[in-house]
Image: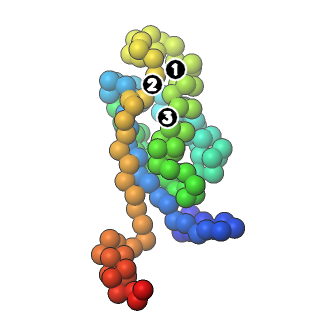
Amino acid sequence: MEEYRSHAHSVSSCKYHFVWSPKYRHPVLDVVEVDVRELFAETADHFEHEILALEIADDHIHLFVQTDSKHSPADIARQFKSYSGKHLLERYPEIRESYFWGGGFWKVGYYVGTTGAVSEKVIERYIEETEH
């Protein structure tokens, strides 16, 4: 894992912790775990994200990802959820019929938190002590 990503005009260190669950919080992820891991890996490769950690419980997932600053957290959540959700419903029609009759695999909402190399206090002190 590289700490920073460099581009022609920027350097960034963007790491996000996501949590989301299947619609209606149905405990079905143990059945589709292998596929979720595969589909998330494909999404990460396609968008050049790096999955730092992935934990899959029966009724929710934790995804820790590093990416470029050009991707907003909302974009990242949409990328992972839309691609995997579409393919999971196609691969598991019995789950779709039993649990997701309303369409869509994942709940609309999600949690996202950011991480960084320094604390809020360090940034605040740096800004306050910098001469302008």
Residue drawn where x is 37% and y is 80% of the image: 127
Residue 39 sits in quarter: top right
Q: Nearer the viewer, residue 61 or 74?
A: 74
Q: Amino acid at mark 2?
A: Phe
Colouring of the image: rainbow
Q: Nearer the viewer, residue 124 or 39?
A: 124
Asked whether the beta carbons under mark 3 and mark 2 sit within 8 Å of each other, the answer is yes
Residue drawn where x is 46% and y is 48% of the image: 73
Tell me if mark 1 has few (under 14), some (14-19) or many (20+) residues whose alpha carbon lies within 10 angstroms of its own.
Answer: some
Is 6 on the left-hand or right-hand side of 84?
A: right
The residue that label 3 is drawn on is 81
Which mark identifies residue 105?
2
Tell me if mark 2 has few (under 14), some (14-19) or many (20+) residues whose alpha carbon lies within 10 angstroms of its own.
Answer: many
Is 108 on the left-hand or right-hand side of 90?
A: left
The residue that label 1 is drawn on is 89
Label 1 or label 2, whichever comes before in sequence order:
1
Label 3 or label 1, whichever comes before in sequence order:
3
Between label 3 and label 1, give the one nearer the viewer: 3
Residue drawn where x is 38% and y is 48% of the image: 112
Label 3 or label 2, whichever comes before in sequence order:
3
What is the distance, in whole Å, between disc 1 and disc 2 at their CAs? 7 Å
